[in-house]
Amino acid sequence: MPLKKAVSGGLLSETPLSNEQSLKPLPDSDRQRLRAMVSDDQETLWWVFGLGENVRVWEPQSWVLAVREKATRLSVLYEY
């Protein structure tokens, strides 16, 4: 499954996520655009969740929605 996301700094440059991976610097940012072929499974999605604010997922859309939903549920826990 194609995965597109922005990652912080040198994350994934030394330990690639996939053999089919490319990292390109984003303009005016310390982030890089990652493109990789990954498994469409819960384990890989949990790995993405573990990156927290250090990642922005663009594709696949199902993962974008899952990350957005989890972020919304987390923010509700911290509302006063």
Image (spheres, rainbow, N blue to C red):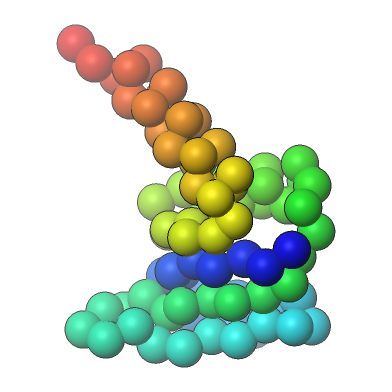
Task: Please state the horizontal and vertical placement of residue 37, each as a whole percent of the image.
Answer: 73, 72
Task: Please state the horizontal and vertical placement of residue 59, each as a whole percent of the image.
Answer: 55, 60
The structure residue drawn at horizontal position 37% and vertical position 76%, both measured from the top left corner, is 31
Task: Please state the horizontal and vertical placement of residue 54, each as a whole percent of the image.
Answer: 43, 59
Tell me how many marks there are: 0
In this picture, residue 51 sits left or right of residue 78: right
Residue 15 seen in the figure: no
Q: List the single residue furthest toward the top.
A: 80
Residue 47 seen in the figure: yes
In this picture, residue 37 sits left or right of residue 55: right
Above-or-below relation of 47 to 2: above
Foreground pick, 74 / 37: 37
Q: Quadrant of the N terminus?
A: bottom right
Q: Quadrant of the C terminus?
A: top left
In this picture, residue 16 sits left or right of residue 53: right
The structure residue drawn at horizontal position 50% and vertical position 39%, both measured from the top left corner, is 65
Residue 8 image-quadrant placement:
bottom left
Task: Please state the horizontal and vertical placement of residue 66, each as a whole percent of the image.
Answer: 55, 37
